[in-house]
């Protein structure tokens, strides 16, 4: 267990050691048990966490806000419009001031080529931990909840499991790359054989593919990319099927929407779930387009763990806050 995490930024789990990540998971499991037993755990009494949202959220905002309450602290919701950020205040000035008031700050900014850079600029000057609540490149708090959920279903030793992350058809809007990129990086570090499936135009950023290959090699597991959803689902233990935009292929939203409409058959259904192992689970970070990217039969079926997964956002976020806030 690594106990020296106070004040540590979490912008990507790739920059955390496996021991540090395991420590967060240990804390999360303990806090989940304590909540289930009704034990008070006011570990952050009188502490304040700022939540700066450039993009809207359901699970992330409420998990952070509820988590701080359960830990005995207070969370404050901020947006650019409700602060001077909307009038051009720099990251340095924002975090210098908030760092003198409170104990940590989380940021959600998914704008491509902006979000991660903004967080790193904050972290450069911050004396309190900066937590990535999702950016254009990474979604570490969701990925941590995902590995916790997998460990609950398959046991702490996840080596040898076959993890599939597959693109799905979802035409309503263009989703960021942060979720698939975070998953291919983290699951390979936990000893899983990772298969990434997508139509040709929906590839991820090359540097993330190279890092995932390196992670897999260092952990003695496989990392494969396929352009066939059926192939990806075969023999899978975990099928994580969700959409993302062709952001690495084109910067045009119009072209991106047209490309999404080329592949309406990339849908997660019961036939594809049956291609996996008998005990395979279906995962999705939500929100999912019911009846479009995934059938109701799968989403509400016995192999779906999406609500357990969503609940674990709370427990893992509490672990991050408890471990890092100054």
Image (cartoon, rainbow, N blue to C red):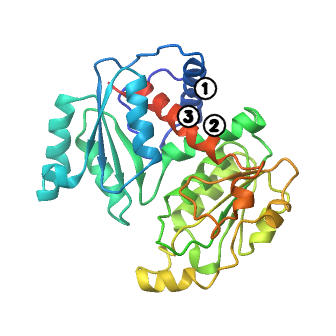
Which secondary structure, mark 3?
helix
Please say whether residue 221 is visible from this viewpoint. Answer: yes
Residue placed under numbered mark 2 in the picture: 148
Q: Is residue 272 left or right of residue 38?
A: right
Which of the 4 image quadrants contains residue 34? top right
The quarter of the rendered structure image containing the C terminus is top left
Q: In this view, does 39 lie to the left or right of 10?
A: right
**Which residue lies at the image location 70% right of the left edge and 41% below the top edge?**
150
Tell me where residue 154 appears, x and y as whole percent.
77, 38
Residue furthest right as drawn: 278
How far apart are the alpha carbons under marks 3 and 2? Answer: 11 Å
Which secondary structure, mark 2?
helix
Tell me where residue 7 appears, x and y as whole percent.
35, 29
Decide: marks 3, 1 in contact (CB < 8 A)?
A: no
Q: Is residue 258 above or below residue 126?
A: below
Residue placed under numbered mark 1 in the picture: 29
In terms of sequence position, does the residue under pointer 3 or pointer 2 come before the other? 3
Q: How crowded is mark 1: few (under 14 residues within 10 Å), some or many (20 or more)?
A: some
How far apart are the alpha carbons under marks 2 and 1? Answer: 8 Å
Pair 3/1: label in front? 1
In terms of sequence position, does the residue under pointer 2 or pointer 1 come before the other? 1
Decide: marks 2, 1 in contact (CB < 8 A)?
A: yes
Q: In this view, does 113 lie to the left or right of 264?
A: left
In terms of sequence position, does the residue under pointer 3 or pointer 1 come before the other? 3
Q: Is residue 262 left or right of residue 324?
A: right
How far apart are the alpha carbons under marks 3 and 1? Answer: 13 Å
Q: How crowded is mark 3: few (under 14 residues within 10 Å), some or many (20 or more)?
A: some
- Residue 273 circle label: none
Residue placed under numbered mark 3 in the picture: 21
**Which residue lies at the image location 17% right of the left edge and 46% below the top edge?**
92
The quarter of the rendered structure image containing the N terminus is top right
């Amino acid at each position: 267990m690594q106990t020296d995490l106070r004040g540590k930024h979490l912008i990507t789990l790739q920059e955390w050691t496996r021991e540090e990540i395991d420590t967060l998971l240990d804390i999360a499991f303990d806090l989940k048990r304590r909540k289930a037993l009704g034990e008070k755990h006011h570990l952050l009494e009188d502490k304040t966490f700022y939540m700066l949202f450039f993009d809207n959220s359901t699970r992330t905002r409420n998990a952070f806000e509820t988590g701080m309450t359960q830990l005995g602290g207070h969370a404050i919701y901020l947006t650019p419009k409700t602060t001077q950020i909307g009038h051009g205040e720099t990251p340095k000035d924002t975090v210098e001031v908030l760092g003198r008031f409170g104990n940590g700050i989380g940021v959600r900014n998914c704008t491509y080529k902006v979000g991660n850079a903004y967080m790193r600029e904050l972290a450069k000057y911050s004396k309190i931990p900066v937590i990535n609540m999702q950016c254009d490149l990474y979604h570490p708090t969701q990925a941590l909840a995902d590995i916790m959920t997998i460990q609950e279903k398959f046991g702490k030793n996840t080596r040898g499991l076959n993890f599939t992350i597959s693109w799905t058809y979802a035409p309503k809007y263009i989703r960021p790359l942060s979720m698939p990129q975070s998953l291919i990086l983290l699951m390979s570090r936990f000893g899983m054989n990772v298969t990434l499936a997508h139509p040709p135009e929906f590839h991820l950023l090359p540097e993330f593919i190279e890092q995932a290959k390196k992670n897999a090699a260092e952990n003695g597991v496989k990392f494969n990319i396929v352009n066939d959803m059926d192939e990806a689902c075969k023999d899978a233990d975990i099928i994580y099927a969700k959409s993302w935009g062709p952001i690495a292929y084109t910067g045009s939203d119009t072209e991106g929407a047209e490309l999404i409409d080329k592949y309406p058959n990339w849908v997660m259904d019961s036939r594809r779930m049956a291609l996996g192992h008998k005990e395979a689970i279906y995962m999705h970070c939500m929100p999912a387009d019911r009846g479009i990217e995934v059938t109701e039969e799968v989403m509400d079926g016995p192999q779906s763990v999406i609500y357990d997964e969503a609940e674990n956002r709370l427990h893992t976020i509490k672990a991050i806050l408890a471990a890092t806030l100054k």
